[in-house]
Amino acid sequence: MTERLYYQDSYLTAFEATALNAGDRVYLDRTALYPTSGGQPYDLGTLNGVPILEVVDEEDRVAHLLAEPIASGPVTGSVDWARRFDHMQQHTGQHLLSAVLAERFGLATVSFHLGAESCTIDLATPSISADLLEQVEQRANAEIVANRPVLVTYEDAATAQGLRKASERSGILRIVEIAGLDRSACGGTHVRRTGEIGMLLLGATEKVRQTTRLSFVCGQRALTWTRNWRRDLASAEGRAATLTASLKKMSAENATLSGVRLYHETAPSPDGLRRHLRRGIDENTRAEAVAFAGGPRSLYLAISADSLVLAVSPDAGVDAAAAIKPLVTRGGGGRTLAQGSVADPEQAATMLLRLPEAG
Ligand SMILES: [Zn+2]
């Protein structure tokens, strides 16, 4: 029977004990090292300076798997505090989250998993709305800020009252209580007050059979998640800007190709000029106009509700800027390309498509 020192003090990081056997799978009379159980992973640390690889719960005993063998007799043990405290934050956060989900929102927690990067709980519901999740997250963080004490008591299973989830065990139960919020039978390690959880951040949900798996993180993990999201967002914004720029370039190139294609598809009028009228002007119209008028003997006109673009080939016998000048309220350009605002685009089109005037 191994005495579990973490039951009394989850903040104990150094302890003296006796190794009951020699080897690399060692049993102690007492240990502060937590073995995998109840959804919480094992601790790391050392025994007589030898690194611990895993700690296994064998019901009555706790087995310490070591990187190399040690002798039986007195040992000094240490607990990897960063890892343990992270587990305490996640685990206490889970009690708090499950309590909030049960009390305020009527959702029961079916199971809990504390992973290397995130934690999950399975909830007895086929779905859960994003709006509800925000309320849950808000409530959970308010309970963290309330800094409620987390207490451990020992009570008889037959008479223990007010447990969030009925225990299957009989005899004496170890009850972990978040004062005024939750009472659960649990053998895990927890922080002393909810404030030490730091922050609780909800992640994605996933439907697993008839339950919904909800991921969450607490403490430093919440900061790491947020930081990663910020980095991902910045890199996504960068990619979006690059894509937007290349899309713009492609659509200008496409407009140029379209201008060339239009030129070849347009039959010359009896005077030998190829004329094209486009209704509607957008950011690519100029590129299409210039490409069309890149062909010999051509005139390209685009009109919108209040403006026009005129492009002509140098051999068209038309000066674009001079041609639009009497028609536009404001605008200008050069001999082969001009644009401006116009009061009556249809009338302007009728006149411009007649160019060059005979004589
Ligand atoms: Zn617990």
Image (spheres, rainbow, N blue to C red):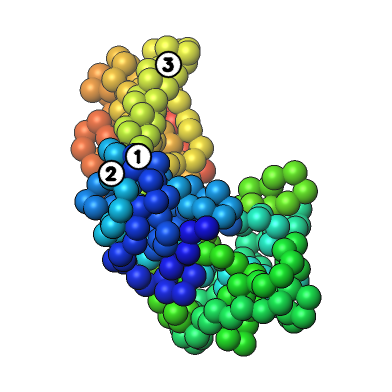
**Mark carried by residue 24:** 1
Q: What residue sits 22% from the left and 33% below the top?
A: 335
User: Is the residue under label 1 in contact with that under label 2 (CB below 8 Å)?
Assistant: yes
Mark 3 or mark 1: which is in front? 1
The Cα–Cα distance between marks 2 and 3, rounded to whole angstroms, is 83 Å
User: Is the residue under label 1 in contact with that under label 3 (CB below 8 Å)?
Assistant: no
Residue 230 picture location, percent across and down: 34, 56
The Cα–Cα distance between marks 2 and 1, rounded to whole angstroms, is 6 Å
Name the quarter showing ligand 1: bottom right
Indicate whether 197 appears above or below 87: below
Q: In the structure shown, which secondary structural element does the residue marked by tag 2 occupy?
A: strand
Tell me the kind of residue under disc 1.
Asp
Is residue 169 visible in the rendered image? The answer is yes
Residue 108 picture location, percent across and down: 73, 65
Badge 3: residue crowd in 10 Å (few <14, some 14–19, many ≥20): some
Tell me the kind of residue under disc 3.
Arg
Residue tagged 3: 261
Badge 2: residue crowd in 10 Å (few <14, some 14–19, many ≥20): some
Badge 1: residue crowd in 10 Å (few <14, some 14–19, many ≥20): some
Tell me the kind of residue under disc 2.
Ile
